[in-house]
Amino acid sequence: MSGGRLGISVFRAGELISAAEGFDAVSQRLVECNDANASFWTSRRFTQQNFTVVPFGLYVRGLYGILQLEVQQRRA
């Protein structure tokens, strides 16, 4: 698909960086990308957890907001 121009190296969890260091490692260009659960970065940006496993990754108020939005859309 990429004609050999794209190389991907896969590392086990914790082999290069810890799970909580992924955001910083990409920002500092220590690694080119990171695939991790966004809940690790809630101390930086609280809203990051909303992108992890929606709707089940939300806190109670966020989940309630989504349910209310769905109810309003059904009524419309």
Image (cartoon, helix red, strand yellow):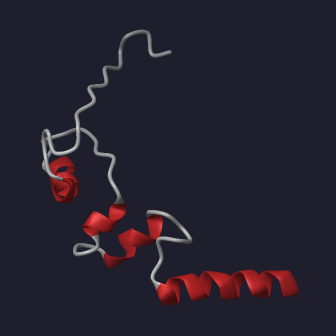
Looking at the image, is 9 positioned above or below residue 39? above
Q: Is residue 37 visible?
A: yes
Q: Nearer the viewer, residue 72 or 15?
A: 15
Q: Which residue corresponds to the image point at 31% horizontal and 20% vertical from the top-left?
A: 7
Residue 76 can be seen, yes or no: no
Q: Please, which residue is most extreme toward the top here? A: 3
x then y, percent, for residue 33: 28, 41
Q: On screen, 4 above or below 16?
A: above
Q: Quadrant of the C terminus?
A: bottom right
**Where is residue 10 drawn, in percent x and y?**
27, 30
Where residue 19 sits, quadrant-wise, is: bottom left
Q: Which residue occupies 51% across, 84% down?
A: 62
Q: Quadrant of residue 43?
A: bottom left
The total of numbered circles placed on residues is: 0
Q: Nearer the viewer, residue 54 or 25?
A: 54
Task: Farthest residue to the right: give it.
Answer: 76
Q: Quadrant of residue 44?
A: bottom left
Q: Is residue 74 above or below residue 29?
A: below
Give the x, y percent position of residue 41. Answer: 26, 67
